[in-house]
Each structure stands twice: as C-alpha cells, then as structure tokens.
Image: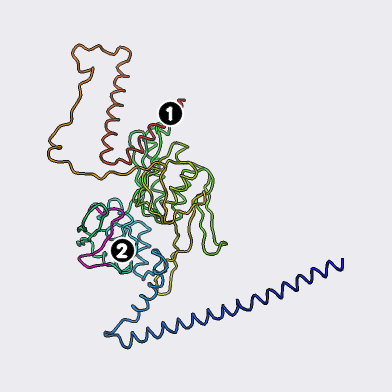
Amino acid sequence: MKKFVMAALGGTLAGVIVTTQIAAPLLAQEAAKSTNVYEQLDLFGDIFERIRAQYVEDVDEADLIEAAINGMLTSLDPHSSYLPPEDAEAMQVQTRGEFGGLGIEVTQEEGFVKVVSPIDGTPADAAGVESGDFITHVDGENILGLALDEAVSLMRGPVGSEIIITVVRESEPEPFDISIIRDIIKLTAARVRTEGDTVVLRVTTFNDQTTLNMTDGLKKQVEEAGGMENINGFILDLRNNPGGLLTQAIRVSDAFLEEGEIVSTRGRNPADGDRFNATPGDLAEGKPLVVLINGGSASASEIVAGALQDHRRAIVVGTKSFGKGSVQTVMPLRGNGAMRLTTARYYTPSGRSIQNLGVTPNIVVEQPRRRPESEEEAETPRRNFRTEADLRGTLSNDSLTEDEIRQIREDREREEEAAKLRDEDFQLSYALDILKGLSALAPKN
C-alpha cells in the first residue's frame, strides 16, 4: 500500500514539474502578445494624432474614431458592423415592422453591394430589383469599396424622392439603371390566402409580428374553408425572405413540429452554445407541407426550411438558399450606438451548417423569367380543340346525375384556373401540384 501511495505521489510531483516546464513558455508568449497589443494601440494613437494634426483638411475626430471602429468590425465578416445612434434606432423600428427606404436587404461581397432580396410590396420590388443583383452606383456615384453602412446611407433619403441605382445582373450583358421612389416601408410579416384546397402562407420577414400574423391568418383560412378536413395541405413561401429575428424563426418552425430540435447555435466557447426544441402542437395538424425557397431566402428563413426538411415534415421546393449560417448579436454601446457582432454559427437538427452552402431543396425548380409576348403571339388566339361533347347528336352521359356533372365542370374550371398560375408563378404552381398529388394518394376515410 505504501509503495502504491508513493508511486501516486511521484506521478503527481512529476506532473507538476512537467506542467511548470510547459507553462513558463506559455506565460512568456502571453506576455509577448500583450506587449504587441499595446504597441499596436500606441501605433493607432500615433496615426490618429498625425491625421488630426497634418491632414490637408480639418477632420472630425468623432468621425475618425467611428470609421476606425467600423473598419475593425467589418474586417471580421460581412455581417459585423458598428451602428451609429440613428442606425441603431432605425434597426429597432425595422424589427417592429415599419421603416423608411427602398425595401431591399443587402450584404457585401468582395467590396460589392449585393441584393439579398427585395421585400414584397416595396418600391424596390415594384421597380424590378431582384435577388442577386449587384448595385454599383447610387445616383451616379460609384459605391465600390465603400463600407456597407456608407453605401446604405447613400440610398436613404426623404420619402417621395427619387433614387437611381445602377445594377449588374448575371442574366444581362450590360449594367442598367433602375429608378425607385423612396417610401415608408410597412411590412406585413405574413400574409395567408387559399389557392383551391391549399392554404398558402407567405412570410416576407421575421419580425415581432411574424408568428402572430401567420397563426391568425392560418386559422382564419381554415375556418373559411369549413375546417381542416377541406384542406389538402399548406405551402410556406419563404422566397426572397432575408431573415430577421432568431426567436421568430424558432416559433414558426415550432408551429409545424411536435417535437425534436429546431436549431442549435455554437459560439467560440462551446459552453455558450444553445439548443432550441419544439413543443407539442402542429398548427397544420399533420397535413402535408411544402416550403418554397430561393436564392433570396436567408438566415432565419434557412433555419425554418432546414428544420422542417431535417425532420421530414416538409418537402422543400425551389432553388438553393442564400447560405447565411451565422448569428449576430446587437450589443448597445455608450452614446446610444450599437455593435452588431457575429457571435455564433447555427446548425440544423441533423448537425449541418448551411454557411456558404445554403439549404438545397428536395426538388429543384427554377422560376422561369417572364418574357413579354411578341405582337404576333399576342394577336394569335389559342387553339381550342373540339371534343366529343361538341359533336352533333352525341350520346349523353347517363351514368351521372346533374349534380355530379355540375361538380365535374366546377372541378375542371378550378383546375384550369390553377393552370393559369403556372404562367404567373411556376414554383408556387409546382408546389400546389405536389399537394394535389399527395392528396389524391391519401386514403379516403
């Protein structure tokens, strides 16, 4: 027993010695790092003083400091930035659902300002701005190389004033100008309607009103349809939804999930990670669900699409999403400003990160670009084929009652109306067709 104890003590002592031998160089390295940081801060102070004293024109010291802070943050990633007091206030207003501007969500890609998505019903949407557009000039002024906040500030202006942005679009051979009239942007976070037997939930952003708008609208449409038994399924349309509040993305996902993880976040320190789980209750009561996404679906939209896809609760249709898999925390600063800092990555329930990859749909469906009809095509009427019913003296159908015949005709008219939607919104009509197919295969009660 004594030998065993001694051996243990010996091992402990040896461990202490080894630890000390390793710790000494580490402490020296840390001290060297601290010295280097202080030297760099001294360098910053020297440059600041020289600019203030020797620059060709007088400079605003506060502007210099703000530019240095913003440069430090924007060097980290495209989503970290400093928010001056007016921008911090505007962001709070935006999450409540009303703000002034053009109605576009933008990011920065290699110095270029890139449109993540136009927001439904806004001046930018009406003017034809598209997800993936690159903005190169604002009112003729080149914005290449400007910080994102600087470029955005150039796009702001009085409500009712005109702005001309120059856009580079992948499908167009040359840059072109788009004229937009600035307006107050009033966001309806979610709009709900019925297409045939399908309830379509259009979610445009994730703000404080999203879940409430969506759940109230869904219940109303189901009631108007005469109950859930008359609904064949639901479409959650997240196309061109740039994201928003993480809490709202979790609630929208939870609305269609009974259990399981929705999303997890992992920061620099593993102990700071979070997991968010669904609670019992499915607003759709297990009915089939299709989620529509495209390249303008980002951040919170991707959390919802990824969660519903991983749990096999929904079929995801459309094109690959934007690929923003990071979480930003807004931290208030002295002087009423704020710092938006990337603090974590998020992961779907299966453990995948969509950062730079996006969510890949289960069924890839491109949205064809609408091409105006030529004058010749517009003047040429569509050919209507004659059928058996048009023939003189045709036999009547004696196997059906008048009510059954009327029902067939009504169903046919409804299908023809649905077919017209393919010209207006091919992706949505595709989703509707999926739900019709699933409904046709469902067992009859």
Quadrant in which residue 140 is drawn:
bottom left
414 up-or-down from 426: above or below? above
Q: Position of residue 374 (x, y in %)?
A: 15, 41
Dot 2: what SS? strand
Q: Position of residue 137 (x, y in %)?
A: 23, 64
Q: Position of residue 80 (x, y in %)?
A: 41, 66
The residue at 39%/37% (across/down) is: 222
The answer to whether marks 2 and 1 mark residues whose Cβ atoms lie closer than 8 Å is no
- Which amino acid does the dot numbered 1 rest on? Leu
Front in this rendered view, residue 2 or 202: 2
Q: Which residue is mark 2?
A: 112
400 up-or-down from 73: above or below? above
- Which amino acid does the dot numbered 2 rest on? Phe
How far apart are labels 2 and 1 at the CA level? 49 Å
Q: Is residue 141 a member of the stretch shown in magenta?
A: yes
Comparing labels 2 and 1, the label whose residue is closer to the camera = 2
Q: Earlier in the sequence, mark 2 or mark 1?
A: 2
The residue range painted magenta reads: 127-143
Dot 1: what SS? helix
Quadrant in which residue 202 is drawn:
top left
Q: Which residue is mark 1?
A: 441
